[in-house]
Image (tube, rainbow, N blue to C red):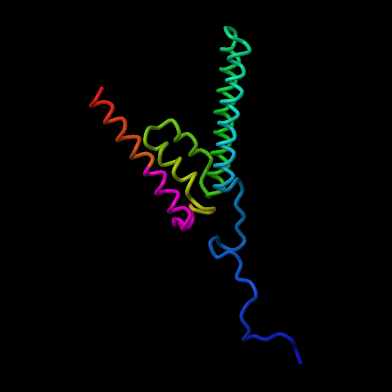
Amino acid sequence: MSEFNPFAAPADFGDVAKPSGVIYGGIGRLAYFGFSVLAYIALILISSGLRYAFAEDAFPLLLILVVSYYATLLFLVVQRLNNMGYSGWWTLGIIVPFLNLLLGLKCIAAPEGYAFNKRLDTAGNIIAGIFVGIVVLAIITVIVLAVLG
């Protein structure tokens, strides 16, 4: 008698969120967020040290540091876009007003393969809500300061 039972439930359903056989490159949203925060912390710490160490001659070093920081962020955005299934050319959207907010929202909230299923998971919905809330608070703050100032 065979041990194969055609009526048994499968042992593993695999990852139902992505089509079978599709392997996305790049980095996930948690790695994107973590590396972005680490790059920003490194920028602050190194620039503070350079400012005090090289009082008047710090500008060229700070310029190199800021350019390398933004190059790192561009690399992270390209990797994140590849993970979502988008072309890396969408990185150019960073220089377009309001498109950069949408791009940032997608990079921080969209799950792997978002370009194909166009649906956020629960974590993505929570992250998107927090992101939109912060943007709305920033806009309200600017308006209040403009009216009062």
Q: Residue at x 62, y 10 (%)?
A: 54
Image: 80 above or below 92: below
The residue positioned farthest toward the top in the image shown: 56
Image: 54 above or below 1: above
Image: 35 above or below 1: above
Q: Residue at x 37, y 39 (%)?
A: 135
Q: Residue 129 versus residue 98: which sits nearer the camera?
A: 129
Instruction: Answer whether residue 16 is magenta in the image.
Output: no
Instruction: Answer whether residue 132 is magenta in the image.
Output: yes
Left or right: residue 47 versus residue 126 is right
Dominant secondary structure (helix, strand or loop) of the stretch shown in magenta:
helix
Q: Residue at x 56, y 45 (%)?
A: 82
Q: Residue 36 versus residue 89: which sits nearer the camera?
A: 36
The location of residue 136, given as percent across then percent down, is 33, 40
The residue positioned farthest toward the left in the image shown: 147
Name the quadrant containing residue 75.
top right
Left or right: residue 51 versus residue 149 is right
The residue positioned farthest toward the bottom in the image shown: 1
The location of residue 103, given as percent across then percent down, is 44, 41
Q: Which quadrant of the rendered structure holds the C terminus?
A: top left
Q: Residue 56 versus residue 79: which sits nearer the camera?
A: 56
Q: Which residues are magenta?
A: 115-133
> Total marks drawn?
0
Q: Residue at x 76, y 92 (%)?
A: 1
